Image: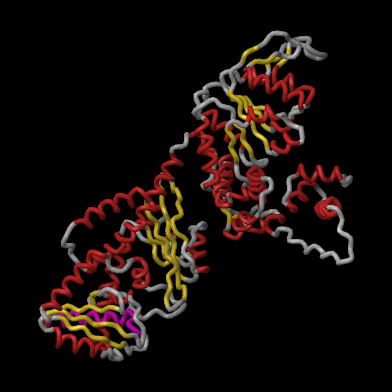
Amino acid sequence: MMNKLTPHQPGNKPHAFAVLVHVLAPIRQPVKIQMEKQVKRSRRMGKTVEERVKINCKNGLHVRVAAMVVQKADNLQKEHKVTFYIRREGMHNVPLTSILLVTALKIRQNEEIYLVTVGEGAKEAAKEMKALLESDFSMSPVELGQVDTLLQDNAITAENIYSNIETGLVVADSRYTVIIYNRQAEKIFGIPPKEVLGKKVTEVFPQSKLPEVIDTGKPVLGYAKTIGEVNIVINTTPIVENHQVIGAISSVLDVSKLMQVAYTFANRQAMEGISVVKSLSEIQELMDKISRLSAKTEYLEEELNRRQKLNPAFNRMVGVSSKLYDAMKMAAKTAENNFNVLIRGESGTGKELVAEAIHYSSERKDKPFIRVNCAAIPENLLESEMFGHVRGAYTGAIKTKVGKFELADKGTIFLDEIGELDKAMQAKMLRVIQKKEFQRVGDERTIRVDARIIAATNRNLEDLVEKGEFREDLYYRLNVIPIWLPPLRERREDIPLLCDHFLGKIAEELKRPAKKITPEGMAALVNYSWPGNIRELENVMERVNILAEGQMIQKIDLPGYISEPLSGKALREPKEEEEIMPWEYYEREIIKKALKKYKSFNRAAKALGLTHKTVAAKARKYHLEE
């Protein structure tokens, strides 16, 4: 037997009816019009009684009282051949025989409502019903048992609705405990109920918005995710009772099924004479909600389809952020032509991966992809590396060497750190880009080459051009199609996915189960600034995978500069009479303090939110190497 239902008290779990009232919106427009026509028709025939009623019950029309009202209304309707409705001032009529709809009105003590009675015996029936509504609703044991039986029957109906609707439902109470997890949610997430119900939502679904919504009381609507091959849209909203958030509900919509349901409902809406059965009408309310969201989900479905249309070569790019996908969309378009591409972004953002994806999704995918790091090759050897040399071209050239451009013929050459080239090499690079020809070092013969050029840099080329350190004509030749990759701090929503990716990759290499990160640890990772971007994140994952005890990576396992970032003390405010020093003075003091505390360029750079290279350069500038 199910327990008797009692009015909700603050701190309890959300009641089944509270959740259903939250999910099922007020009755849809066609039904409303049908009821109003019936009332007007009866009023013309003199068979309608409308009276103001004041609710005196201490707790208003709560669940148990609503059940008593519905039971009485059902009996009087049969006895007097009438139909009861109630409504608020300015609102439409609501049938008095639906517990869910009556409860949804949330009518409170001393509130006045309208009682509308339609039918042959309207006058006598209205008198009895008004007396009940204005009473204190004291119940005898027999009546109490009947009411509880009615509530039990409706609770069973509620469970059936939860189990059979084509929307996944995950409901958590104010303590983040999952109390409802229906069959559709199980089908979408692939996790059995026994592993979800009764557990903290943060343990089962670490990225769920339920805790955030419970804490803030603000809904989070329309965010998309992909689970395996299923594209879903999630709406998470708070459940509020007596001005207090008592839980939250996530409705999980399968986009493809959603569109099918919305289309079916649109056809059904056009039909006349909709049958108003209590349980069906309640499900119909959910369909109405789906219909209102259809425009939004159409956009989301198009967005998801757009993302899925990317060539499989882009699958190595992990993330769901809009900035990343905008960059991927641009990169995918460049694969359809042979124009030069310039990939911009900070160090460690994945520029080489994007270059590879462009090449392997283009018509040149079966031809060579040649990588050249312009910053890693000494200036005196760079020309030889790029264009090759003949035997005897210089001391030590004991045999002819083929250069990178020649190796990339018919394929793609990726010039990383193009901003590090000196002016002499820039002029030679301009020639090979413009005329598609070059000469080996020590050779007079001209070699023609058909290689697509993809360049990348983390430097501000516009500033270098302005300073005369980078040729303007070369800049415009390279910057035909620019692609900007966002730093990791601008796509924080991708950090959990990247962590899982790297931990899975490490586990596969070690042939061990992948470790997981606790919510506290993940929060610290998401809040960190990541000056080294994805490369730094991968290094941190490798470190914690080794140092963490057990399968869960705790916040304490993370490096100190991530788990407890340097907050520092506020800079001392200069006195009015104190002289303001040049910027370099303060910059030197900050770098000096960081190096003194952390003893290395790398750790000091991470604490200051700078790159290792920047701190090293500043240290040399201010003679702080020692």
- Please identify the dominant SS of the magenta region: helix
Residue 184 place in picture, x, y as percent: 35, 56
**Which residue occupies the foreground of this view, 192 or 541?**
541
265 relative to 607 in the view: left or right: left
Range of residues picked out in magenta: 60-79
Instruction: Pinpoint residue 210: horizontal percent, then vertical percent.
Output: 48, 63
Residue 310: where, in percent of width, then height?
47, 37
Judge whether residue 69 is colored magenta.
yes
Is 150 rendered above or below residue 552? below
Identify the residue at image location x=65%, y=33%.
Answer: 456
Image height of 622 relative to 363, above or below? below
Quarter-wise, where is residue 81 in the image? bottom left
Residue at (52, 43) in percent of width and height: 325
Question: Residue sitting at 15 percent across and 87 percent down?
Answer: 123
Residue 138 visible? The answer is: no
Q: Position of residue 597 (x, y in %)?
A: 82, 55
